[in-house]
Image (cartoon, rainbow, N blue to C red):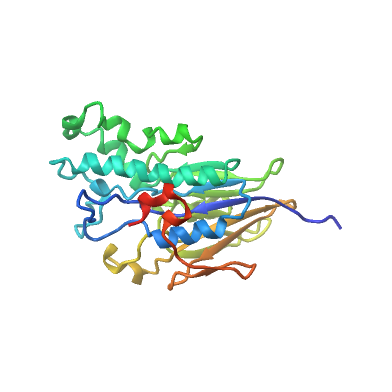
Amino acid sequence: MKKVIKLQTWLIIPDTHIQAPRDDGQFNEPQFCHHPAAISLMLQYIKNFKLDGIIHIGDLMEMDCISHWTKAVGREGQIKDTKGDWYAASWKAQKKMAYAFWEYLSKTHPDAVKVQLEGNHDQWSRTFFSHPMFSQFDDEDFNPQKLAFHNWSLWKDLNIKYIPYWGGETDSNYIIRAPGYDRGLVVMHGFNNASVKKMYKDFDNVVYGHQHKVVSETYDGNYWEDRAAHCIGCLTKLKAEYNSNGGARNAWKHAFALVNLYSDNVTQVRVVRIHRDLVVGNEAGETFYPMPLASIDPTLSVLDY
């Protein structure tokens, strides 16, 4: 009997919603942003893994001045007041934070394929910064077109494959499969429930984010095997006021995923849950506790909020 071996391991990072504070160090309310403790646990967990690929699933940034949550239904993503210099400072800070996040991963896993999917929060910047209101900021230091997420030099500088989202049900996605194999795993942001629709329509195994939950939905397509769409949680702060359905009470969970590809053409999705007390352990019996991101690497200090 031919021995089955593991060919590749990929890290799939869910929604982080990195948000820069105002100049006074405070966030707009509610404080819907990344959770440094949850991110630190993920980074500790994967530190000794040999990763063949890293995919951020989308909504890397919160983009507060565009998409900040509001009780007014349907207001997400609309142009907000652009008076004052805070927007310029906020965007510069967010770019610095995004660079620090990916720069660390590139340094610790230099040979891994790196992919950034565009989520709905990230995508809104394309229309936001093309709005005439931003002509007031059109100078050498704050050029609106260069500030749009997809135009950031980060992707080219760190050799990250950037996959945009253009709206509708054709979600940004990336397929991971071992060399020489025809079957793989579709990784997508999951906006507009496109992930589950793809599983039903095309019988693909899918990993997605967007909903901030840990959920596995299956479908018996009578084709090879049962297919599943795995929602892998988030790395954002969990507060009840974040959405109209109750935020953390709406089953939001901290987690991330590791995907293993095997020589028998099988992909294994392992969702790593981060417990409510923010302690996570691995199969080797190691236990990790939250620590300041700066203590993991000084580059990450800008994310310690």
Does residue 212 appear in the picture of this structure? no
Q: Residue at x 25, y 56 (%)?
A: 69
Q: Position of residue 291 (x, y in %)?
A: 44, 62
Q: Quadrant of residue 175?
A: top right
Q: Position of residue 64 (x, y in %)?
A: 26, 49
Does residue 292 appear in the picture of this structure? yes
Horizontal arrangement in the rendering, residue 37 relative to residue 244 (left or right): right
Q: Position of residue 133 (x, y in %)?
A: 16, 34
Task: Return the residue nearer the eye: 9 or 215.
Answer: 9
Task: Return the residue nearer the eye: 219 or 92.
Answer: 92
Pick out the residue farthest to the top.
140
Q: Quadrant of residue 278?
A: bottom left
Q: Residue at x 43, y 64 (%)?
A: 213
Q: Quadrant of the C terminus?
A: bottom left
Task: Return the residue nearer the eye: 175 or 295.
Answer: 295
Horizontal arrangement in the rendering, residue 35 relative to residue 196 (left or right): left
Horizontal arrangement in the rendering, residue 84 relative to residue 158 (left or right): left
- In the image, residue 264 sits, relative to residue 95, either above or below, namely below
Horizontal arrangement in the rendering, residue 46 relative to residue 72 (left or right): right
Q: Residue at x 52, y 54 (%)?
A: 207
Q: Position of residue 302 (x, y in %)?
A: 36, 49
Q: Quadrant of the N terminus?
A: bottom right
Pick out the residue farthest to the right.
1
| Number of marks | 0
